[in-house]
Image (cartoon, rainbow, N blue to C red):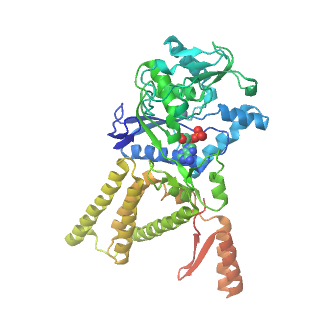
């Protein structure tokens, strides 16, 4: 595996510190709103990374924090006139629901910042002991950027030419205004009841401190991978490095990975610009989690991705092509079980055995193309190209009657393998789409009776009713076949 490291600005071969076990930290949501699909571009990228590591046989310990106290959550709680926890709790739950709707594998841990304030205070104390922190007149504690020689190495901050500004109290700021940043913020009336005691007086942690403390608590002083969206690179990740390396004197993270933004009309999708869609907005418009996942992963993570409804519609078509192929292969491979195989079993016929070996070899080529793509810095567009080449090849082999049921089963196994990374093929079944609801079965049964009684008007009415509920019915020699229109997650 090789990945692009934001620290060195090049692709590097990846080997975990502990053989076979990857420790990674991903910056999680700030729970002051429903996450928008720009945020989910970052979480699906991290999900792909996690799945590729597992695909390569690694065990993964992934920690994703939940930022439930910062400038934005405090402002939100104050505006809503409720305690902080009351304000954030529904957004935390919604976040887990959304991850599930997008088939994002859960991380091993989701620590909440408010549960780790004592670890944060201990970290500030270590920085004081090293002479890297000081308390300002306003009571807040700052990190002394000029005392850390390597400050700016991740963002490639031009410290020669950028004049260091005054202290910055805000969590987010531009490179041009870099300066000493807040570790601990002294209490202000606008913080309401969001307050903790510390050796430096009452106050609350800064956002950057939260991630350093939680990462060190669960992953140790040095670990393998740290990820986030590109906007996290500066100042958030730069400041995490400063805090942790300043305290431990050891390297914090070996590999830093950042995804580019999801954009709308050329601008970053963001809450502050108001040009965002939440997952819920899109689900309400009738798109499925599966279609949205497809759009979010189908681009290289280091290139910005433009969000359009056309892309969602195209995803629906692409997924239908995969589904049709998978359905046909399933039907064909089931002939093995039913002993309907038209081919002579391969062990009885040397020619058949040769043909089978040839196919197996070809499948190996598809597997290699797929593996090379995902292992080369998560080249998912290339991986999809391998998948669709396999779809085309299987369809035409099926069409020509050249695929044995055993071969169809082998192709399905390869699709399953690819899907451990992509998470879009079996997702349909995982979402329960293959299960036909009792209500639909009852309507189909009623339609069977109507047709038996040659009551065509009633039969047509029931067909329309099924369609209105999202189910397409087809009449065949074996009777009615019912299929979900699009997807029903
Ligand atoms: P936040 O909740 O603002 O802390 O952001 C959560 C994650 O989403 C971070 O990793 C951000 O970098 C990422 N993010 C925010 N907006 C976008 C976007 N438009 N495209 C991709 N990632 C984003
Ligand atoms: Zn973070």
Q: Disc count in the image?
A: 0
Spot occupied by residue 51 in the image (x, y as percentages of width and height): 44, 46
- Residue 154 lies, with reference to residue 243, above or below; the image says below
List the single residue furthest toward the bottom: 454
Q: Quadrant of the N terminus?
A: top left
List the single residue furthest toward the right: 81
Of residue 269 and residue 369, the one placed in the foreground of this image is 269
Report if residue 374 is visible in the image.
yes
Residue 193 relative to residue 181: left or right:
right
Say which quarter of the image contains residue 94. Answer: top right
Please tell me which residue is depicted at 39% across the width and 52% down the height of the picture.
Answer: 379
- Residue 182 lies, with reference to residue 471, above or below; the image says above
Spot occupied by residue 158 in the image (x, y as percentages of width and height): 44, 31
Spot occupied by residue 147 in the image (x, y as percentages of width and height): 47, 17
Of residue 104 and residue 265, the one placed in the foreground of this image is 265
Say which quarter of the image contains residue 31. Answer: top right
Report if residue 86 is visible in the image.
no
Quadrant of the picture in which ligand 1 is shown? top right
Please tell me which residue is depicted at 37% across the width and 77% down the height of the picture.
Answer: 399
Please tell me which residue is depicted at 53% across the width and 83% down the height of the picture.
Answer: 477
Of residue 274 and residue 322, the one placed in the foreground of this image is 274
Spot occupied by residue 235 in the image (x, y as percentages of width and height): 53, 32
Residue 361 relative to residue 186: left or right:
left
Of residue 428 and residue 128, the one placed in the foreground of this image is 128
Q: Quadrant of the C terminus?
A: bottom right
Residue 361 relative to residue 8: left or right:
left
């Amino acid at each position: 595996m090789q990945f692009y490291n934001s620290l060195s600005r090049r692709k590097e071969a990846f080997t975990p510190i502990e053989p076979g076990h990857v420790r990674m930290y991903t910056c999680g949501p700030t729970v002051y709103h429903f996450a928008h699909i720009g945020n989910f571009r970052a979480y699906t990228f991290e999900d792909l990374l996690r799945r590729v590591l597992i695909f390569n046989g690694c065990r993964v310990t992934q920690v994703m924090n939940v930022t439930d106290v910062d400038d934005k959550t405090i402002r939100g709680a104050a505006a809503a006139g409720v305690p902080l926890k009351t304000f954030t709790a529904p957004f935390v739950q919604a976040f887990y629901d959304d991850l599930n709707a997008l088939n994002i594998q859960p991380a091993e841990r989701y620590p909440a910042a408010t549960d780790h304030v004592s670890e944060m205070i201990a970290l500030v104390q270590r920085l004081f002991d090293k002479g890297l922190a000081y308390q300002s007149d306003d009571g807040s504690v700052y990190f002394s950027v000029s005392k850390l020689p390597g400050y700016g190495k991740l963002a490639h901050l031009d410290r020669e030419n950028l004049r260091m500004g005054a202290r910055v109290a805000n969590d987010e700021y531009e490179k041009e205004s870099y300066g000493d940043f807040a570790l601990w913020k002294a209490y202000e009336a606008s913080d309401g009841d969001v307050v903790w005691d510390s050796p430096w007086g009452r106050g609350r942690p800064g956002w950057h401190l939260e991630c350093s403390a939680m990462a060190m608590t669960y992953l140790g002083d040095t670990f393998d991978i740290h990820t986030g969206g590109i906007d996290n690179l500066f100042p958030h990740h730069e400041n995490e490095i400063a805090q942790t390396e300043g305290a431990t004197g050891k390297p914090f993270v070996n590999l830093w990975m950042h995804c580019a933004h999801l954009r709308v009309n050329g601008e970053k999708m963001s809450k502050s610009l108001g040009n965002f869609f939440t997952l819920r907005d899109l689900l309400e418009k009738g798109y499925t989690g599966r279609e949205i996942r497809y759009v979010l992963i189908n681009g290289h993570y280091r290139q910005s991705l433009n969000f359009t409804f056309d892309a969602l519609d195209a995803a629906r078509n692409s997924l239908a092509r995969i589904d049709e192929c998978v359905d046909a292969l399933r039907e064909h491979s089931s002939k093995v079980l039913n002993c309907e195989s038209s081919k002579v079993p391969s062990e009885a016929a040397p020619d058949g055995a040769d043909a089978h070996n040839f196919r197996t070899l070809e499948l190996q080529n598809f597997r290699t193309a797929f593996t090379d793509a995902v292992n080369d810095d998560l080249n998912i567009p290339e991986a999809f190209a391998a998948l669709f080449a396999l779809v085309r090849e299987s369809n035409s082999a099926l069409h020509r009657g050249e695929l044995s049921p055993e071969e169809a089963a082998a192709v399905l196994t390869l699709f399953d393998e690819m899907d451990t990374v992509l998470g879009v093929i079996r997702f349909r079944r995982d979402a329960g789409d293959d299960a036909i609801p009792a209500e639909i079965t009852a309507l189909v049964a009623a339609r069977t009776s109507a047709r038996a009684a040659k009551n065509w008007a009633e039969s047509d009415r029931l067909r329309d009713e099924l369609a209105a509920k999202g189910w397409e019915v087809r009449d065949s020699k074996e009777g009615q076949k019912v299929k979900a229109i699009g997807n029903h997650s």
